Amino acid sequence: MSTLCPIRALARWQKAAGIVSGPVFRRIWVPPRPKNAPANWTPSYAVGWQAIDPRTVARIVQARGAAAGFDPARLGGHSLKRGALNTAKDLQVHPARLKQLGRHKSYTPLAAYIEEGDPFADNALNGVL
């Protein structure tokens, strides 16, 4: 298994957040600085008990994308799926495995996620003729 294994990542998140039951994806925030906090006070993250709402991932992706200079209106939660599928494609993962990763029933919806780039750069017939 690779370091990007989602099963291992999930297990690490559950352990770090202390999640043993209930929703897996929860709100994370930094509590306000206490009034009597020392000058060297370092904030720590808090993990809530309730599940995040359906738009949370999209808002995070849009905010991070805007901070990186991208148009947030063109980004959403599916941007992560698109990125994962294209990264796998760039690593020459077989299309059948891409379809499985994307949980697509056929290759047609998968094709909408894949960015082809230059069709002549890695053509199957390069060097044949």
Image (cartoon, helix red, strand yellow):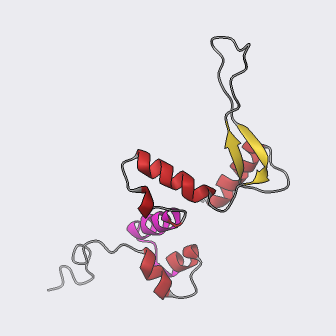
Q: Residue at x 23, y 84 (%)?
A: 125
Q: Which residues are magenta?
A: 79-96
- State yes or no: residue 127 in magenta: no
Q: Eyeballing the image, is 54 above or below 9?
A: below
Q: Eyeballing the image, is 117 above or below 14?
A: below
Quarter holding the N terminus is bottom right
Quarter holding the C terminus is bottom left
**Residue 89 versus residue 32: which sits nearer the camera?**
32
What percent of the width, then of the height, locates residue 81? Answer: 52, 67
What percent of the width, then of the height, locates residue 119? Answer: 25, 78
Q: Residue at x 57, y 78 (%)?
A: 100
Please name the predominant secondary structure of the magenta segment in the image: helix
Q: Residue at x 53, y 77 (%)?
A: 97
What percent of the width, then of the height, locates residue 45? Answer: 69, 35
**Residue 35 versus residue 121: which sits nearer the camera?**
35
Q: Residue at x 80, y 44 (%)?
A: 18
